[in-house]
Amino acid sequence: NAGVTQTPKFQVLKTGQSMTLQCAQDMNHEYMSWYRQDPGMGLRLIHYSVGAGITDQGEVPNGYNVSRSTTEDFPLRLLSAAPSQTSVYFCASSYWSGTGPSYEQYFGPGTRLTVT
Amino acid sequence: GNSVTQMEGPVTLSEEAFLTINCTYTATGYPSLFWYVQYPGEGLQLLLKATKADDKGSNKGFEATYRKETTSFHLEKGSVQVSDSAVYFCALRRNQFYFGTGTSLTVIP
């Protein structure tokens, strides 16, 4: 049981490049989400999904794209990287209660992204 | 709107000292409240939760009480250990989670 896995652990991009952060979970969770963690700002929700084929925007979606073709995978795409996207990115998953994510969210170990 | 405010860090304590990390919230309706902990190099893990007013969440010696009248959910531990060194996040849940900025705790022997 691997839980939530994220790849890569570290990444350096140049401004304007694109890339995909991978996230996978093996707990059959309906709800998956992406957060970014910045100093002094805590975790902010980028995008989330409540099931395969269903995605929605969070608090800070601009510059990011997601899709959910399977229950297990929820990749985050940076379309044209900017220095403001330098951050630590966390993927999380949980069951869906019907009105929101269940109480315990499971987080991956994070991806540290630097955009120069 | 929904938001969480928690005390600024970093906090440095000696082993066996008493810990308090303050957290207040603003929310529509009646949210559930949480403390999550992040150990170095890892993702966040649920530490404890409280789902209604006056509930006390507890785990691993940590406690927090849901105070509706003061909109607070302060984290306490009577005697911290070096292994408690981590970043602690207060959070609330409505249709999604809202996290505070995190408080870094370092416990020195």
Image (cartoon, rainbow, N blue to C red):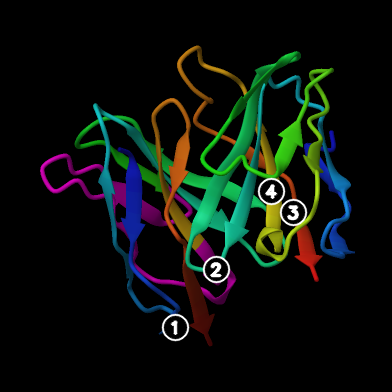
Based on the displayed image, in which of its 4 quarters is residue B5 positioned?
Answer: bottom left
Residue found at x 48% / y 31%: B96
Front-most of residues A112 and A80 = A80
- How crowded pointer 2 is (Cα within 10 Å; few <14, some 14-19, many 20+) is rated as few
Q: Is residue B56 above or below residue B43?
A: above
- The answer to if B60 sits in the magenta stretch is yes
In the picture provided, is A92 more to the left or to the right than B79? right
Q: Is residue B4 above or below residue B18?
A: above
Q: CA distance from mark 1 to mark 4?
A: 26 Å
Q: Do discs 1 and 2 share a chain?
A: no
The amino acid beneath tag 4 is Phe
Circle 4 chain:
A
- How crowded pointer 3 is (Cα within 10 Å; few <14, some 14-19, many 20+) is rated as many
**Which structural element holds mark 2?**
loop
The amino acid beneath tag 2 is Pro
Q: CA distance from mark 2 to mark 4?
A: 14 Å
Q: Earlier in the sequence, mark 2 or mark 4?
A: 2
Mark whose residue sits in front, 1 or 4: 4
Mark whose residue sits in front, 2 or 3: 2
Q: Which residue is mark 1?
A: B12
Which stretch appears magenta? Answer: B59-87
Q: CA distance from mark 1 to mark 2?
A: 18 Å
Residue found at x 26% / y 30%: B52
